[in-house]
Image (spheres, rainbow, N blue to C red):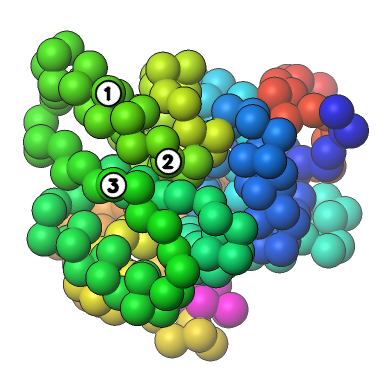
Amino acid sequence: MADVYRVDVLGVAISAIDIEEAVQTILGWVADDQHKYVCVTGVHGVMECQKNAKLLDIHNRSGLTTPDGMPMVWAGRLAGARTMRRVYGPDLMLAVCEAAQLNGISMFFFGTTETTLHELVTRLQARFPGLAVAGVCAPPFRETTVDEDEAIVDVINASGADIVWVGLSTPKQELWMADHLDRLHAKALIGVGAAFDIHAGHLAQAPSWMRRSGLEWLFRLSREPRRLWRRYLTNNPAFLRAIVRSPPRLIRGPPDYRVPPQT
């Protein structure tokens, strides 16, 4: 496999790609019968990795860890990845679904609630009439039992889905994908968090100018202050301080490359 470039952002290997490259990479896994997962990661994910060695390892063993937020893109460009672009979870979902409807690639949606899943699938199939949806599953809002987990695996595998979209939020979705990769037949597991609620019509997106300028966090904070204030008002300054101490750097290696320690 050819080497790929990533950007070491505080030890997290962020893929130096754009959305077209991400889609083609995922379609390639399906065509070649590979089995990989995608982490869609911004400041929150990077900062969670600073506190959780297992989560850091999961990000660095992914098939792709995409730059979900503009700070990841800015970090990449600072390191020399001039063509790196934002690969935002909701946009990635739409781009993959658009390509999938033309290639007979089937989808499974795992996460959130039955109501949200129904609305999500209805909207996606209206937008992409040829989209093949193999199935959906809304897990319980608690840790699943061993029997429940085995049943979920059986349902997903029986569906024959090529791609499983996982909407459980960070870090739960990354942990779930890593723990289930070898038990599922799907070629790609993609953790997209809030994309389920956005495309189901339950969660508003920031205006495009805010997304481009890196101010989406401010929009989301204004909509969900009680849930998000600690994340943004603690993580964002801590991220900036850490980046000053340990500037991002361009690294090279295969998709399972582990970031070496800073010297």
Q: Is residue 46 left or right of residue 13?
A: left
In the rendered image, residue 68, in percent from the top left (x then y), is placed at: 54, 57
Which residue is at the front of the view, 73 or 26?
26
Q: Against 159, is 175 above or below?
A: above
Residue 26 image label = none
- Residue that carries the numbered disc 2 in the rendered image: 161
User: Within 10 angstroms of label 1, few (less than 14), some, or many (20 or more) residues?
Assistant: some
Tell me the kind of residue under disc 2: Ala
Residue at left offset 36%, top offset 61%: 195
- Quote the CA–CA distance across marks 2 and 1: 12 Å
- Quote the CA–CA distance across marks 2 and 3: 8 Å
- Residue that carries the numbered disc 1 in the rendered image: 154
Tell me the kind of residue under disc 3: Gly
Q: Earlier in the sequence, mark 3 or mark 1?
A: 3
Residue 245, by quadrant, is top right
Which residue is at the front of the view, 140 or 246?
140
Q: Badges 2 and 3: C-beta atoms under 8 Å apart? A: yes
Which residue is at the front of the view, 239 or 36?
36
Q: Badges 2 and 1: C-beta atoms under 8 Å apart? A: no
Residue stretch rendered in magenta on the structure:
211-215
Q: Is residue 48 visible?
A: no
Q: Earlier in the sequence, mark 2 or mark 1?
A: 1
- The quadrant of the picture occupied by the N terminus is top right
- Residue that carries the numbered disc 3 in the rendered image: 135
Q: Earlier in the sequence, mark 2 or mark 3?
A: 3
Q: Against 40, is 218 above or below?
A: below
Q: Is residue 173 visible?
A: yes
Residue at left offset 48%, top offset 43%: 163
In the rendered image, residue 38, in percent from the top left (x then y), is placed at: 55, 41
User: Within 10 angstroms of label 2, few (less than 14), some, or many (20 or more) residues?
Assistant: many
